Image (spheres, grey):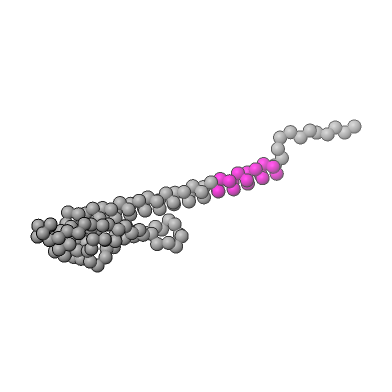
Amino acid sequence: MRVKAIQSGFSLLEIMVSVAIAAIALLGLGSAQLKSLQYATSSFNYTMAIVQANNAAERIWPNLCVLKHGGGFNGNFKNTTLAPQIDDYSITFPANFNDDLAIEVQWPDSRLDDGLQSKLRIFAQYPTLSAAECGL
């Protein structure tokens, strides 16, 4: 009389399939984490670009009368006073100063390969002041 042995535990094949499934799941989680970090960095760069643009708009206020009536917007003022605080960012202004000023900020974003240019534009509005109101 032959007695069948009762199998207990898992076979080697079952273990190998389980390990393969677990490895694929962990690779998927790692990839998702990497994309999450890329998007977080992109969001940080976008936020910093907004800060750079708003800082440039705010630095115009103390010189508003001079820029409106005395010129000087195209010279050294753009390159020194309105220059971004972080070298990775570049700020572009229109050729002449006006009451509705478009400020564009660009930055490199090599982490995302979506083919889109990393830039934003804000529009700063300044009051119309006469030379008499400026004390000129």
Q: State the image coordinates of residue 25 (x, y, percent, origin top left).
A: 58, 46
**Quadrant in the picture for residue 13:** top right
* Closer to the camera in the image, 106 or 17: 106
Q: Is residue 15 magenta?
A: yes
From the image, which quarter does the C terminus lie in?
bottom left
Q: As drawn, which residue projects farthest toward the right?
A: 1
Q: In this view, does 45 lie to the left or right of 24?
A: left
Q: Is residue 34 magenta?
A: no
Q: State the image coordinates of residue 40 (x, y, percent, origin top left).
A: 42, 49
Does 73 sit above or below residue 41? below
Q: Is residue 75 left or right of residue 93?
A: left
Residue 76, can we see it? no
Q: Identify the magenta region.
A: 13-28
From the image, which quarter does the N terminus lie in?
top right
Q: Main secondary structure of the magenta part?
A: helix
* Closer to the camera in the image, 21 or 128: 128
Q: State the image coordinates of residue 7 (x, y, percent, origin top left).
A: 76, 35
Q: State the image coordinates of residue 133 (x, y, percent, origin top left).
A: 12, 57
